[in-house]
Image (cartoon, rainbow, N blue to C red):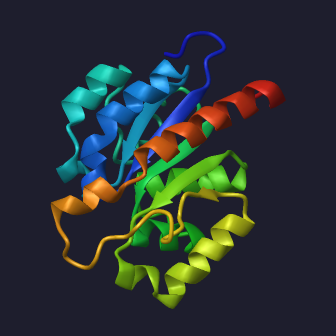
């Protein structure tokens, strides 16, 4: 459970190689004062070290819906990060599809609303797809903070493989999450 008064950050990981680098990001967010919980899409699970993340956060990584009569084991979130955010998840958020726990939680966060910072990681071909471009525009208009600028954050080419992880803007995400925490602290919960 979070320390009294500590803000809770839900980190949603989608299926992509950068999901393997979450332990370092989670540790940095904790050092910044966040209580962190990790939610994964089913596709993210193959990239993640679930035991390491559970040890760091004190919570199991959630990836599936619970039964209605089961208690929620995680504290309520104050904000969300989606890292990495796949082409699929970005488009599902805009369509309102909630076929996974992760996307369902993000859709609820849009509706509440809670702050969301997402780092879309499509390859260059998918970034040009009309549905993705429309989704980026819609999410921004709904107040979702997207760290997405192919001129600043280069995108991988199709089938680039593991080196694509080196393109992920972890340091900018850490700075954005730190700024968000200060904003929430000032504005209140």
Above or below, comparing residue 63 to residue 93 in the picture: above
- Count of labels in the image: 0
Q: Quadrant of residue 158?
A: bottom left
Q: Nearer the viewer, residue 188 or 58?
A: 188
Q: Among all residues in the image, which is located at the extreme front?
A: 151
Q: Can residue 71 be seen at all in this image of the molecule?
A: no
Residue situated in front as seen by the camera: 182 or 68: 182
Q: Is residue 142 left or right of residue 147?
A: right
Give me the residue at 55% from left, 66% from top. Answer: 93
Q: Nearer the viewer, residue 183 or 65?
A: 183
Q: Which residue shows up at 40% across the image and 37% down it?
A: 38
- Provide residue 140's location: percent of width, then percent of height: 68, 66
Q: Is residue 48 above or below residue 128?
A: above
In the picture, the quarter occupied by the C terminus is top right
Identity of the residue furthest to the right in this view: 187
Q: Residue at x 59, y 31 (%)?
A: 76
- Residue 89 appears in view: yes
Picture coordinates of residue 128 (x, y %)? 46, 86
Q: Residue lying furthest top in this view?
A: 4
Measured along the vertical axis of the image, is residue 11 above or below residue 1? below
Along the line of sight, the residue nearer the viewer: 188 or 42: 188
Percent from the top left, x then y, of residue 25?
39, 35
Residue visible at 74% across and 25% down in the picture: 185
Where is residue 4? Give x, y as percent.
62, 10
Q: Tell me: residue 93, above or below residue 81.
A: below
């Amino acid at each position: 459970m979070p320390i009294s008064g500590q803000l809770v950050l839900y980190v949603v990981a989608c299926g992509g190689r950068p999901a393997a680098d979450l332990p370092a990001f989670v540790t940095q967010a904790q050092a910044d004062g966040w209580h962190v919980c990790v939610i994964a899409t089913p596709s993210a699970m193959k990239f993640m070290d679930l035991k390491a993340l559970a040890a760091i956060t004190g919570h199991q990584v959630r990836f599936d819906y619970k039964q209605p009569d089961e208690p929620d084991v995680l504290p309520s979130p104050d904000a969300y990060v989606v890292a990495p955010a796949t082409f699929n998840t970005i488009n599902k958020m805009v369509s309102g599809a909630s076929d996974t726990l992760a996307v369902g939680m993000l859709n609820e966060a849009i509706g509440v609303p809670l702050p969301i910072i997402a780092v879309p990681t499509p390859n260059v071909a998918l970034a040009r797809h009309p549905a993705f471009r429309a989704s980026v525009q819609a999410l921004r208009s709904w107040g979702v903070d997207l760290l997405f600028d192919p001129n600043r954050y280069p995108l991988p080419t199709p089938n680039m493989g593991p080196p694509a992880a080196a393109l992920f803007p972890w340091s900018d995400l850490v700075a954005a999450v730190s700024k968000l925490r200060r904003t929430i602290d000032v504005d209140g919960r």
